[in-house]
Image (spheres, grey):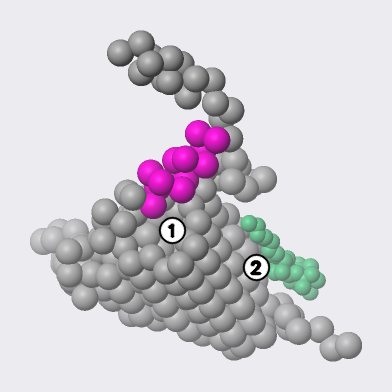
Amino acid sequence: MRWFWSLLGRMCRLPRSLWRRAVDGFVASLIVKSRGVVCGKRVRFEGVPVIVRNCRASIVLGDNVVLRSRPSSNVLHLAHPCTLAAVEPGAKIALGDGVGMSGATLVAACGIEIGDQTLIGAEAVIVDTDFHPLDPAMRALDQTAGAASRPIRVGKHVFIGARAIILKGVSIGDGAVVGAGAVVTKDVAGGDIVAGNPARVAGTAVRAS
Ligand SMILES: CC(C)(COP(=O)(O)OP(=O)(O)OC[C@H]1O[C@@H](n2cnc3c(N)ncnc32)[C@H](O)[C@@H]1OP(=O)(O)O)[C@@H](O)C(=O)NCCC(=O)NCCS
């Protein structure tokens, strides 16, 4: 038994970075997969994300996806981990290859699709449902039944700024940029920069050379 205590003692003295790597590489991936998430190749976790999946919903992560969930994963010091929630039967969250997220929250009652190489900034929120019906009489009967939901599609190579909010039914074209803190309620054309609340076109992402 002495060998066990000696091994444990040595492991306890391992540098914190090695413990972190062990949590990221093994524990986080085990927890995510145990929740029924389909992971592509070389998916990387920094800290453990929150996964909520209805048993008839799907969450799919492409190759080389990076989910940053630890406060120190981002210089903005994240207040909470990445959250992927596919909450209704048939709901689908699909992250394309190379997508990066820092403490962002995605909640799908029907579907959220994020294109390849898109970056989702610190604590951005993407929700395809209102969560509650708008009619107070309906809310009094049931707080959540009858909430409006429409799928969201974010294209490839999109850059979503910190704390932006993207609401139901929005489609964002390839290469667009969403400014920090923007509230996106309408479609964004590919290559446009949008900012503000409600988000309006503030420029174009592809500079003329
Ligand atoms: C949207 C953004 C990319 C625009 O950068 P830019 O092309 O250099 O634009 P400018 O700074 O020249 O601003 C253009 C106009 O948009 C406005 N604007 C820019 N960013 C804005 C924002 N986030 N919210 C509201 N308005 C904004 C500017 O005030 C300016 O308005 P004006 O023409 O009336 O003066 C940038 O401001 C931004 O929000 N970056 C995101 C940073 C971030 O969150 N990184 C991720 C961290 S995890």
Above or below — where is 5 with respect to 151? above
Amino acid at dot 1: Thr
Picture coordinates of residue 19, whole percent (x, y): 50, 34
Q: Is residue 21 left or right of residue 60?
A: right
Q: Does the image show residue 204? A: yes
Q: What residue appears at the point 73 percent right and 80 percent down from the top-left corner?
A: 205
Determine which residue is flagged by label 2.
179
Assess disc 1: are there few (<14), some (14-19) or many (≥20) residues with their C-alpha within 10 Å of its C-alpha: many
Q: Position of residue 105 (x, y in %)?
A: 43, 58
What residue do we see at 21% from left, 75% from top? Answer: 90
Label ID, residue 105: 1
Which of label 1 and label 2 is nearer to you?
Answer: 1
Looking at the image, which is closer to me, 35 or 145? 35
Classified by dominant secondary structure, the portion drawn in magenta counts as helix
Find the magenta span and give its range: 18-29
- How far apart marks 1 and 2 lie (CA) works out to 17 Å
Residue 27: percent from left, percent from top: 38, 44
**Quarter occupied by the C terminus:** bottom right
- Taking the image as shown, residue 175 lies to the left or right of residue 33, namely right
Callout 1: SS? strand
**Which of the 4 image quarters holds residue 109?**
bottom left
